[in-house]
Structures are given as C-alpha cells and as structure tokens.
Image (tube, rainbow, N blue to C red):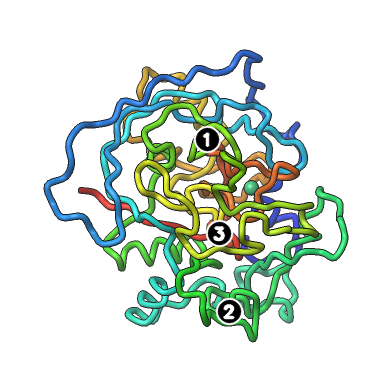
Amino acid sequence: MRFDATFPQNFRCLSVFVAGLGLISGLKAADATKPIFGPTIVNPGKPSGARPEGMVWIPGGEFSMGSGDAAEMCGTNEPVFDAQPVHRVYVDGFWMDATEVTNAQFKRFVEATGYVTVAERTPRAEDFPSVPKEMLRAGSLVFSAPKDAVPLNDVSGWWQYVSGASWKTPDGPGSNLVGNDSFPVVHVAYDDAVAYTRWAGKRLPTEAEWEFAARGGVAGLPYTWGKDLKPGGKWQANIWQGHFPNQNTGEDGFVGLAPVASFSTNPYGLSDMSGNVWEWCSDWYRPDTYSVLAAQPPPARNPTGPSESNDPTEPGVPKRVQRGGSYLCTDQYCTRYLVGSRGRGEPSTGSNHVGFRCVRGP
Ligand SMILES: [Cu+2]
C-alpha cells in the first residue's frame, strides 16, 4: 500500500521498522551457540562471452546463507530471526551490475520508453476507497531529519509522504538531478525496477544470488568487507553516523546518498552492497523462508523464494525482499547493512533510500 490514510502504519517496513515482535510466530530465537558457517565453494570457470558493460562475473557455488548474529536488529530491538538459521545454498554463476542503477542510467531508460514510475502516477480513487480524494496525490516517501531527537518507535518522526517526490525530483517539487547523474536512482517501486531490468535485457537478483555476490566468496563474515566495522579507522560503506534520526555527522563522507562506487569494492568488484540504498530482490518475503529451506536436504539449489509473501508484522500486505541496508542504517536503530540480514518492502512503495541493481545469465 503505497498510499493510505493510515500512514504511517503501512510504511513501517520502509526503514525497516517493526513493532510487535510477539506477532512473529513460529520463529525461535537462535541458540546461544553461534551458527556454523561452512566454507564457500566457488564454481570454477568463467563464461566464454564478453563481459557486459558495467557488470562483473559472480561465479556462483555453494555457500552458507544467513545471519550468524542474533543481536542484529531492526527497529526498536527486533533481532533478525528472519535471517536464521544459516543454511547451505547453491547458486549458478551470473553477471551482476557492479553498482546500483544510477540516475543517468534510469534517465536513458525513461527517455527510450516514456516509462512513468509508480510515484509519478496519481493514485486512483477505486484502489483507495477509504482515502479522501484530496489526499490522492502522486508522491513518495522522503527522509526528513527532525530537529531534535524523537522516539524511535514512530517512523513518522522522520518519514514524510511528499507529494510530487519522484526519481527525478527526489526531495519533492523544485528538487532535481543536476550534478547527481552518478547517484543511485531512488523512489523506484518494485515494478519500476522490473520494467528497467526488462528494457536492459536483465532481471533482478534472487535473494540468494544477492547474498552470494555480497559475501564475495568469503564465508561467515558480518560485513561485505570483512570482520571489523571500521578497519584502520576507515568507514567502508555509506551508513549513518551521529544520533539517529536527527543528527548525521557524515563521518563516512556523506550525510545523504553517495555517488555509486564511492567506497572500496568487495572481492567480486561490487560496490555499495552494504549501505547507500536498499536494493530490490525478486523473492517474496516471508520471515520463515530460511527455516523452511533449512529443513530440506542441503543445499537449496537456486532458490527463488516462497510462492507468496507473509509478513506477520503487517498481515495482508505483500512484501518483496530488499537487501543491503541504506545510508540510514545505524546500530542505534537498524543494523541491516550487515551482509547476512534481510529487509523487505511493499512492492508499490518507493522512498529515497530504496534502489536496485540488475543481474543476467551468462
Ligand atoms: Cu537499516
């Protein structure tokens, strides 16, 4: 539900906030002992074809997928049980965009096709019968830092539905993309991302492909770059420093979004697999996806996710998986920039911290 009079309740998972842990039924807390990550067994060989522009080869193979740290959290003290248990998964090799899709790339797509994104379309009264007509305005969610500290259990303290906000006016009417060609495109709904991938002859990654790629062939590390948050005192990703959500010190070099590839790449040559913007994956979201796979003989081969979504924190609202966290991630609120953790979003809901990247077969 991109637009609804009950805002902000339906937008909770944008950043990704979840209240009511008690609602997550059927999930058990992880054992006190750490889950064991097996080695990553990388497929040999390379594709014979030429490397597609802007993409890197992800060899695929077998790896341990999931989060090893039950202390990871999202929202006010919600541990990431949905990323457990760690289980064995196999994925075939594929090409992946080295960076998040940029404004310049998305602009070429829109110019070639005339595509109008979900955020630019005026919501139809018949789709939102309970919403007063005057509130049916095209727009999207924009992060807006409050002046002072606010309670972290109410996302309306920092998310605003801005009429007229879209990929080309990311902060709302009057804003533009001048100088921002190499920034990740934002305010893209799931359908917008899929439309772009089709035009580009690509597709969205599955969640398993995304995590295999993000781990860079290395097993069981918490971050895409290794085991320490700030090796050598240096930030490795565009996340939040300061006090969330009212004060961002920009210690990593960026207060808001960063141009893609502003930080070191992972071993596969991928940029920003942690932080900057959340990235859409093709799987439906369910918190029990991993426990279902873990109960089957390993490894799960090229998993594509459950056949339908279920998010017990918002019953009836379908969700697609998002991965990687964003520039708003912080240990004070949401640690889902960690490589094994998961996010999700309602497919028609974009915001200024959600984007995507594409993959394609060899
Ligand atoms: Cu986060």
Q: 48 above or below 162?
A: above
Residue 169: mark in rendering: 2
Specify the amino acid type for callout 2: Thr
Q: Which residue is mark 1?
A: 340
Mark 3 or mark 1: name the one nearer the start of the chain.
Answer: 1
Q: Which residue is mark 3?
A: 354
Real-space Cα separation, disc 1 to disc 2, in angstroms? 32 Å
Residue 190 seen in the current view: yes
Q: Splitting the image into 4 quarters, where does residue 138 fall?
A: bottom right
Residue at the outermost front position: 232
Q: Position of residue 323 (x, y in %)?
A: 51, 46
Mark 2 or mark 3: name the one nearer the start of the chain.
Answer: 2
- Position of 149 with respect to 197 (left or right) is right
Specify the amino acid type for callout 1: Gly
Q: 180 above or below 292?
A: below
Specify the amino acid type for callout 3: Val
